[in-house]
C-alpha cells in the first residue's frame, strides 16, 4: 500500500467530469495528492483517474478545455444498433494524451469498474486494477467503463459485453475499501449517484458534490464544450477547498454548514461567470489585435511612424 491514508473516488458523469479536474487542483494545493493510497474511477472518472496517474494537473486542465465535442458526439452509422456515437474520438484522445505504460507501471493502485452484461437487462459490476496490465487491455477497460448505453457501443472484454460502470456502481468506493482503506475523498459529479455509507463500516467519507447545478444529460453529461469545462473546473476547485476546510474544522456535518455553503456557492458562481466573461473578452480583443498587427505588417506600415 502507498504511504498515504486516503482513497480518491471519482464518479461518472460525462462532460461534467471537468469538475473533478478542478477539485484535483485544490487537492494539489492542499497537499492531499501526496496522501493518496489509491484511486478508483468509473466512466469519465476512470479517464480522470488515468489522467492523474500519468500527467500533471495543469496539463489535465488544458486537455479538458481543448476537447472537441465531436470527439465524443460523432455519429457512427455502422454501430447505430448498438450505440449512436463513435468511440474513435475518445480512443484518439487517450492515445494522444495518456501514457498507458506509465499507468501500468504506477506505484499508486488504480481501479476502474465496468458493468458486465448478463443478458435480460441484468448487469454485474466488474472491478479491474490497471497496474501491471498491457496498454491495450487498459484501453479496452477505459472504453467499456465509459460506454454509456444507447450512446456508445458495448466493449467485449474476456468474451463478455461490458457497458458503462455507472450502471452498477457510480461511486466505486468498494475496491479501495477492500484494499484496506478507511478514509475516502469522493468527487461526485452526478446528481443521480447513490452513496450508501452503511456498505462501508468504519469508513470516513468526505463527499464533494457540485454546489450549483452543472447540467443533466444534454447540458451536462453530453456537454463537452470548452466553455462548459472551464466553468466546471473552477467550480470543482472552489467546492473542494470549501468542503475540505469545513472537514478540517469539524464543521462538515454541522446544520449551519449547508446554509453558509449555499451563500458562498452563490458568490462563487457569480465570480466564476464574471472571470470567464472577462477572459473571453480579453481573448477576443487579443485575437483582433494580432490580426491587426498582421495586416499592418503585410501593408508595410510602420506602427511607430
Image (tube, rainbow, N blue to C red):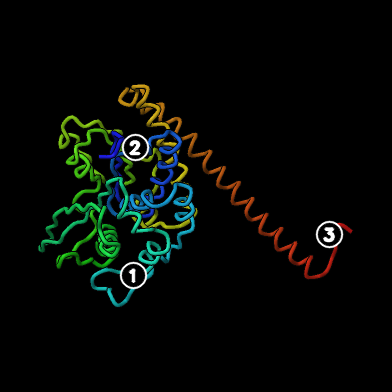
Tell me which corner region of the image, top left, top right, bottom left or bottom right, holds residue 156: bottom left
Q: Is residue 208 above or below residue 277?
A: above
Q: Is residue 120 left or right of residue 101?
A: left
Q: Is residue 29 left or right of residue 105?
A: right
Question: Residue 79, how many percent across, how many down?
Answer: 27, 74
Q: Is residue 101 above or below residue 201?
A: below
Q: Earlier in the sequence, mark 1 or mark 3?
A: 1
CA separation in Å, label 2 and label 1: 32 Å
- Neighbour class for label 2 at 10 Å: few (<14), some, many (≥20)? many
> For numbered disc 1, what is the local secondary structure?
loop
What residue sits 15% from the left and 32% below the top?
Answer: 201
Answer whether residue 16 is visible to the viewer in this image. Answer: no
Label 1 sits on residue: 86
Q: Quick one: quadrant of the N terminus?
A: top left
Label 2 sits on residue: 208
> For numbered disc 3, what is the local secondary structure?
loop
Label 3 sits on residue: 303
CA separation in Å, label 2 and label 3: 53 Å
What residue sits 84% from the left and 59% below the top?
Answer: 303
Question: Residue 101, how many percent across, how many down?
Answer: 34, 58
Tell me which corner region of the image, top left, top right, bottom left or bottom right, holds residue 9: top left
Question: Residue 90, how many percent across, how many down?
Answer: 36, 64
Answer whether residue 118 is visible to the viewer in this image. Answer: yes
Q: Is residue 274 left or right of residue 220?
A: right
Is 195 or 200 nearer to us in this picture?
200
Q: Which mark is residue 206?
A: none
Q: Earlier in the sequence, mark 2 or mark 3?
A: 2
Q: Is residue 299 above or below residue 280?
A: below
Amino acid at each position: 500500500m502507498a504511504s498515504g491514508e486516503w482513497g480518491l473516488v471519482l464518479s461518472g458523469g460525462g462532460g461534467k467530469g471537468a469538475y473533478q479536474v478542478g477539485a484535483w487542483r485544490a487537492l494539489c494545493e492542499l497537499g492531499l495528492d501526496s496522501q493518496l493510497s489509491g484511486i478508483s474511477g468509473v466512466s469519465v472518472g476512470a479517464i480522470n483517474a488515468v489522467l492523474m496517474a500519468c500527467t500533471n494537473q495543469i496539463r489535465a486542465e488544458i486537455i479538458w478545455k481543448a476537447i472537441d465535442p465531436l470527439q465524443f458526439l460523432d455519429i457512427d452509422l455502422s454501430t447505430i444498433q448498438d450505440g449512436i456515437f463513435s468511440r474513435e474520438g475518445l480512443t484518439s484522445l487517450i492515445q494522444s494524451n495518456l501514457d498507458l505504460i506509465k499507468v501500468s507501471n504506477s506505484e499508486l493502485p488504480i481501479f476502474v469498474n465496468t458493468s458486465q452484461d448478463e443478458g435480460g437487462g441484468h448487469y454485474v459490476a466488474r472491478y479491474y486494477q490497471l497496474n501491471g496490465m498491457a496498454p491495450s487491455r487498459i484501453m479496452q477497460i477505459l472504453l467499456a467503463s465509459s460506454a454509456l448505453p444507447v450512446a456508445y457501443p458495448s466493449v467485449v472484454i474476456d468474451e463478455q459485453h461490458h457497458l458503462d460502470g455507472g450502471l452498477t456502481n457510480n461511486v466505486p468506493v468498494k475496491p479501495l475499501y477492500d484494499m484496506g482503506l478507511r478514509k475516502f475523498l469522493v468527487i461526485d459529479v452526478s446528481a443521480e449517484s447513490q452513496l450508501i455509507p452503511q456498505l462501508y463500516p468504519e469508513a470516513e467519507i468526505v463527499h464533494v458534490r457540485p454546489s450549483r447545478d452543472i447540467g443533466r444529460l444534454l447540458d451536462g453529461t453530453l456537454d463537452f464544450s470548452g466553455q462548459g469545462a472551464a466553468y466546471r473546473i473552477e467550480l470543482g476547485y472552489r467546492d473542494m477547498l470549501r468542503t475540505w476546510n469545513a472537514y478540517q474544522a469539524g464543521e462538515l456535518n454541522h446544520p449551519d454548514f449547508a446554509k453558509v455553503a449555499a451563500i458562498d456557492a452563490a458568490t462563487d458562481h457569480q465570480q466564476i461567470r464574471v472571470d470567464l466573461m472577462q477572459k473571453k473578452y480579453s481573448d477576443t480583443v487579443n485575437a483582433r489585435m494580432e490580426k491587426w498587427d498582421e495586416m499592418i505588417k503585410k501593408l508595410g506600415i510602420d506602427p511607430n511612424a
